[in-house]
Amino acid sequence: MASALRFTSPVLRASFNASATIPLRAAAYNGLRTYSTAKTKSLKDTFADNLPGEIEKIKKLRKEAGNKVVGEVTLDQVYGGARGIKALVWEGSVLDSEEGIRFRGKTIPECQKLLPKAAGGEEPLPEGLFWLLLTGEVPSEQQVRDLSTEWAARSDLPKFIEELIDRCPPDLHPMSQFSLAVTALEHESSFSKAYAKGMPKTQYWEHTFEDSMDLIAKLPGIASKIYRNVFKDGKVAPVQKDKDYGYNLASMLGFANNSDFVELMRLYLTIHSDHEGGNVSAHTTHLVGSALSSPMLSLAAGLNGLAGPLHGLANQEVLNWLLKMKKAIGDDLSDEAIKDYLWSTLKSGQVVPGYGHAVLRKTDPRYVSQREFAQKHLPDDPMFKLVSQVYKIAPGVLTEHGKTKNPYPNVDAHSGVLLQYYGLTEQSFYTVLFGVSRALGVLPQLIIDRAVGAPIERPKSFSTEAWAKLTGVSL
Ligand code: CMX
């Protein structure tokens, strides 16, 4: 494996060679010998080869512009959830308020076109998106196939993780079970073991890479074990080593016989992955990771944030809300009936789930891609018709309500309806699927953070008294 590398930096070369002798990592490679014989360049080699150039870019930028002022901060921003404060570096994606997300400069439709697909499939494979996020390059079909094989090969769950999930009470929310299992995977962390042995900083990224790959590989098994335990017979189908990540997730959940659901999983995992660095799950993973907590502990922290109803849990809330609406209005999908229900939600002091966004000021392109999927695969589904009617009416009602800065739907407004159509009707599980995908977005940045030596994060805080003094206000 090492002979295939072309490190230009002596530091990296030394780092790679030294870490190749670490038993845990060597064991990982022993189990993955097939990849070293692949004709195409591996993801790790691609990242390693690009790294010196990326580090140089950051050095140049900081040398030439380190003192430049990039914005100002108002007191309202400080008290308003740090909204819009430019304070983070996130390489994988940038969110534009009007246009939506771009992954390494590419829109969702561009990714749908450019990223490799499964044989016979039309949706992008999430493996390709992960590659793009980590390296900035669109992988070849073979590279994506190799990554599918690698993730399948790393997917076995330690027995104690399965037992841990088995011991959870079925009414412990699936997101708590998910976070618990990811935290417990710390036991397997290559990063933590190497750190305890005194690894040098130059090796941080490689162990973070290995942990991230293991973690991603194991998430479908963990998610499926939770799903099958809580809602089905507890039995999980084995991973098929020659299949892609989305297929295996669908299969382990128990939906492999529906090729449209498999396609939905591929799309779902791709579009929910990354949404720049400031959202709660991404920022939390990055923040906790900045303390050099392992990828397992960092991701678990991010998942706990994703489990909040204003963030990822909104996908469960949306379907609950839609079902309640359906019960209340029956088959009457008239504009008036929808409008009345929206107002009743708002007047009872609740938010309309799936609508609004901290950054976006237009319909979320992740909503649009799911809508297009529905138009293609389930145009006559009554719940899709309801979602479409809400899309027609809600922006007007929310505008009239006058509070939200963005009256348009976000990603969570659509996903539940697609899942329930294929029989995945258990809403409390939906955020777990979001979490599997989110790992594909936040872990590349954690690898990058460790590779470029990002420091521990530590913004400044003041008490209200001190802010008042700073702004010349007497309280
Ligand atoms: N329904 C009713 N009121 C809403 C609203 C909605 N969908 N969205 C925002 N508002 C309200 C806010 O609660 C806030 O009210 P107060 O002034 O009384 O506190 C006001 O409008 C201003 O909020 P904002 O600046 O437009 O939005 P924020 O950046 O503060 O919050 C978000 C963004 C997503 C939390 C908010 O729009 C919301 O609660 N939406 C519903 C929940 C949801 O769909 N979350 C998922 C987001 C996507 C994701 O992370 O997965």
Image: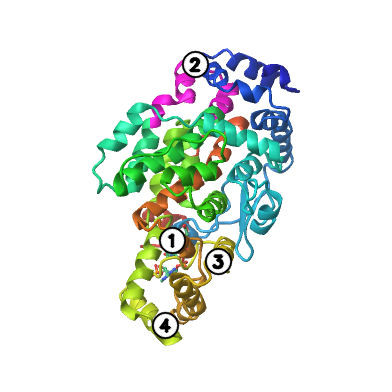
The image shows residue 114 at horizontal and vertical percentages of: 71, 50
Q: Are marks 1 and 2 in contact (CB under 8 Å)?
A: no
Q: Which mark is first along the chain, 3 or 2?
A: 2
Q: Is 431 a magenta residue?
A: no
Magenta-colored segment: predominant secondary structure: helix
Q: Give the magenta-colored segment's residue range.
A: 185-208
Q: Residue furthest front?
A: 257
Q: Is label 1 in a helix, a strand or a loop?
A: helix
Residue 156: percent from left, percent from top: 45, 29
In 3D space, how far apart are the residues under numbered discs 2 and 4 (Cα atoms)? 62 Å
Which comes before the other along the chain, label 4 or label 3? 4
CA–CA distance in space, label 2 to label 3: 50 Å
Whether ligand 1 has any atom under 8 Å from the Cβ at mark 1 is answered as no
Q: Which residue has dot 2 on it?
A: 198
Q: Which residue is mark 4?
A: 339
Can you tell which of label 2 and label 3 is closer to the viewer? 3
Would you say the residues marked 4 and 3 are in contact, meaning their CB atoms lie under 8 Å apart?
A: no
Q: Give the amino acid type for the residue marked by disc 4 in the picture.
A: Lys
Residue type indicated by callout 3? Arg
